[in-house]
């Protein structure tokens, strides 16, 4: 454990103007506050905050952050109060200590709820001062280093899982790769102990002679660059156990089959030399296609800059090489902390770490702990692409992102009003996958609102959270509207006029808070007609008469539409029960129901969309299929027999294409539902005379 004078000397060594008195006061206060408390290892508890502070001195952080690290557990684990911390150390330190404090008394029923609540409060705290994140990461890193002292395996695994899911990605997002790698390695050791032991044992075996191989490759790379006039500092290492295990899992190969477990780094003086060195290396060894990344011209979202390439060095062995300047290397080592280490301006969430603002926005939209964790992991984990607005503003998105993700990244309102997009000047559907360097212009309409089918192609946590929030509100409004219609239908058939007092009494009998709760219960089937009538007119002849008059309500084929409203099934996709569907209000009036994957929807962004579903027991519909048959006698009769055997009915048949080998027919069929159709298609494809059979003009789920 660092002594008081050693800690102060460390800070003064890189910051001669540091407030020595502040550090001394924090050291003494924390030592007295923690008193005789012990850690699971048996060490004095006070050793933990001092070690956390020591980790942060390696990052050359300012005196307020070091003081926060020393004090970070005093509010939770001692009798110290936030007011006392503020009085002795100032409002800035007090605010950070409060932000880092563990919230161990959170009442939770599941691990997800506990993790989600911790993450929620933590993100809100660090959105005010990013130094809170740096202290928290150092705190978690030291806890992981001492995790083996905790006796209960399930507790160790829970902490390791939380570290892998939340804290390692947070470290990566701010460029602190050493923190990330060590956290992942320690967590991996707890979560997959057998795999960890196997990989580390194999690495030890490879190191017998392997370290000499790494030195030889590094030496050869250094000589190659020096012969071309580039002075470079070259080092090599084997990749971390977790990184190797992840590659094995992703590629479904054994460790012996991995050819790229060694990585080398060349540090040069200038950016120009980075590109010269890259050219020299590629002339000497073949590049592995698809493995070159230029993070200098297009930095990662966390500010990371470097050139990455993989080459086939010798004996078909792949070698990864990173090329960067000393300044870039400092950024890669220190990450966000480099802004303090090199006396740059403090980083605020509204400049270089805007992703934190996105995470905080997700806090307001997540309905459950599971959804919160899903969206935050989504926001932290995925690889990035870069896309630009027409004015040249850069936005970073995960791979697979679409214009709807881009729109929400620019502004929530823009996302909600998107009707289409222009990518590189060409109009494309909102589901189009974006590529690196795309220029994206979002087409918007104030009449537009988020659609449920957007969730099929939105990939960012921010976009999905905003869409789900809107859909929940819309679903609530439509549920209440349906409930009101059904309630009015009941009341209209009563033989008497109800007073306000009668309705209020009915709510009390049903245990409902207000009329909206009543409408919700009716729409969701929690209350049937008889229960409502009994509550409105309990035990009366009038009530019995109302039941008789009301009779059986006709079943609703499409849920989400007002009962009795006429609708048509769209001819261009012919949805059948079991398909995911959506309804559109037609410009001339009326409602048309489409399969959610109907191709025509891509051009209908300006339509009035209604989220609907098939009602219970919905059955029967027309589907259209295309069947390609061998051009031989009896082929058509064979498939007619198969269709009849599966109790489907042929409504129409058209010959579309014919040559000497095959002919294609379009067939309209009467089927029960999508599952019935799927089984019929499978039977047709199994027939010798059938070359291909698929559904056309509609849902892909039955293809």
Image (cartoon, rainbow, N blue to C red):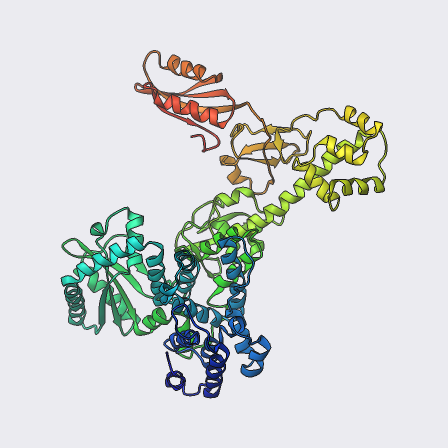
Residue 284 spot, x, y in % from top left? 16, 61
The answer to whether 339 is drawn above or below residue 617 in the figure is below
Q: Residue at x 58, y 43 (%)?
A: 606
Residue 147 lies in quadrant: bottom left
Residue 661 lies in quadrant: top left
Q: Nearer the viewer, residue 115 or 338?
A: 115
Residue 210 spot, x, y in % from top left? 16, 62
Q: Nearer the viewer, residue 304 or 1?
A: 1
Q: Residue at x 74, y 46 (%)?
A: 513
Residue 148 lies in quadrant: bottom left
Residue 350 visible within the image = no
Residue 613 spot, x, y in % from top left? 58, 34
User: Is 33 left or right of 337, judged from the image as shown?
Assistant: right
Q: Nearer the viewer, residue 1 or 176?
A: 1
The answer to whether 526 is drawn above or below residue 346 in the figure is above
Quarter the C terminus occupies:
top left
Residue 293 visible within the image = yes
User: Is 50 left or right of 362, judged from the image as shown?
Assistant: left
User: Is 269 left or right of 547, judged from the image as shown?
Assistant: left
Residue 563 spot, x, y in % from top left? 68, 31
Quarter the N terminus occupies:
bottom left
């Amino acid at each position: 454990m660092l002594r008081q004078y050693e800690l102060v000397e460390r800070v003064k060594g890189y910051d001669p103007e540091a407030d020595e008195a502040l550090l001394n006061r924090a050291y003494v206060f924390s030592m007295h506050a923690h008193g005789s408390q012990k850690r699971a290892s048996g060490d004095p508890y006070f050793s933990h905050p001092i070690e956390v502070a020591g980790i942060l001195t390696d990052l050359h952080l300012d005196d307020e952050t070091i003081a926060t690290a020393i004090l970070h557990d005093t509010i939770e684990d001692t009798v110290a109060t936030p007011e006392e911390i503020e009085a002795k150390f100032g409002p800035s330190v007090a605010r950070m200590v409060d932000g880092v404090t563990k919230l161990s008394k959170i009442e939770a029923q599941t691990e997800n709820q506990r993790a989600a609540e911790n993450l929620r409060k933590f993100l809100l705290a660090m959105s005010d001062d990013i130094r809170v994140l740096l202290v928290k990461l150092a705190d978690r890193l030291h806890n992981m280093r001492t995790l083996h002292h905790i006796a209960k395996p399930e507790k160790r695994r829970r902490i390791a899982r939380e570290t892998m899911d939340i804290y390692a990605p947070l470290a990566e997002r701010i460029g602190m790769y050493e923190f990330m790698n060590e956290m992942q390695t320690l967590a991996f050791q707890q979560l997959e102990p057998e795999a960890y032991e196997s990989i580390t044992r194999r690495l030890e075996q490879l190191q017998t002679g392997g370290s000499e191989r790494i030195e030889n490759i590094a030496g050869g790379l250094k000589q190659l660059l020096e012969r071309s006039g580039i002075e470079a500092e070259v080092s090599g290492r084997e990749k971390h156990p977790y990184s190797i295990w992840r590659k094995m899992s992703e590629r479904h190969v054994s460790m012996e089959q991995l050819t790229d477990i060694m990585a080398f780094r060349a540090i040069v003086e200038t950016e120009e030399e980075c590109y010269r060195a890259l050219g020299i290396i590629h002339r000497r060894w073949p590049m592995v296609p698809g493995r070159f990344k230029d993070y200098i011209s297009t930095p990662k979202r966390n500010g990371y800059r470097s050139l990455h390439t993989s080459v086939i060095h010798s004996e078909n062995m792949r070698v990864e090489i990173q090329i960067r300047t000393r300044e870039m290397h400092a950024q890669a080592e220190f990450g966000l902390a480099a802004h303090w280490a090199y006396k740059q301006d403090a980083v605020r969430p509204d400049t270089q770490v805007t992703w934190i603002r996105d995470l905080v926005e997700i806090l307001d939209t997540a309905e459950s702990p599971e959804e919160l964790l899903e969206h935050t992991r989504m926001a932290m984990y995925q690889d990035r692409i870069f896309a630009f607005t027409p004015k040249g503003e850069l936005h970073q998105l995960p791979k697979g992102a679409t214009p709807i993700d881009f729109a929400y990244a620019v502004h929530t309102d823009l996302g909600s009003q998107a009707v289409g997009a222009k990518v590189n000047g060409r109009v494309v559907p909102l589901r189009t996958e974006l590529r690196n360097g795309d220029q994206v212009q979002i087409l918007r309409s104030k009449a537009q609102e988020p659609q449920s089918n957007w969730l099929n192609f939105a990939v960012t946590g921010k976009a999905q959270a905003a869409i789900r929030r809107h859909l929940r509100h819309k679903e609530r409004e439509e549920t209440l509207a349906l409930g009101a219609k059904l309630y009015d239908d009941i009341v209209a058939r009563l033989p008497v006029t109800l007073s306000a007092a009668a309705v209020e009494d009915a709510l009390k009998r049903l245990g409902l808070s207000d009329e909206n709760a009543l409408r919700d219960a009716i729409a969701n089937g929690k209350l049937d007609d008889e229960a409502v009538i009994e509550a409105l007119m309990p035990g009366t002849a009038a009530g019995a008469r109302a039941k008789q008059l009301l009779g059986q309500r006709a079943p609703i084929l499409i849920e989400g539409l007002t009962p009795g409203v006429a609708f048509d099934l769209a001819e261009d996709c012919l949805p059948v029960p079991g398909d995911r569907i959506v309804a559109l209000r037609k410009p001339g009036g009326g409602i048309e129901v489409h399969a959610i994957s109907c191709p025509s929807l891509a051009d209908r962004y300006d339509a009035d969309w209604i989220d609907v579903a098939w009602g219970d027991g919905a059955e029967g519909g027309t589907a259209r299929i295309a069947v390609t048959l061998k051009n031989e006698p009896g082929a058509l009769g064979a498939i007619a027999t198969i269709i009849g055997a599966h109790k489907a009915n042929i409504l129409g048949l058209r010959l579309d294409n014919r040559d000497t080998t095959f002919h294609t027919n379009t067939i309209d069929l009467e089927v029960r539902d999508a599952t019935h159709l799927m089984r019929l298609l499978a039977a047709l494809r199994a027939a010798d005379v059938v070359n291909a059979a698929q559904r056309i003009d509609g849902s892909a789920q039955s293809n």
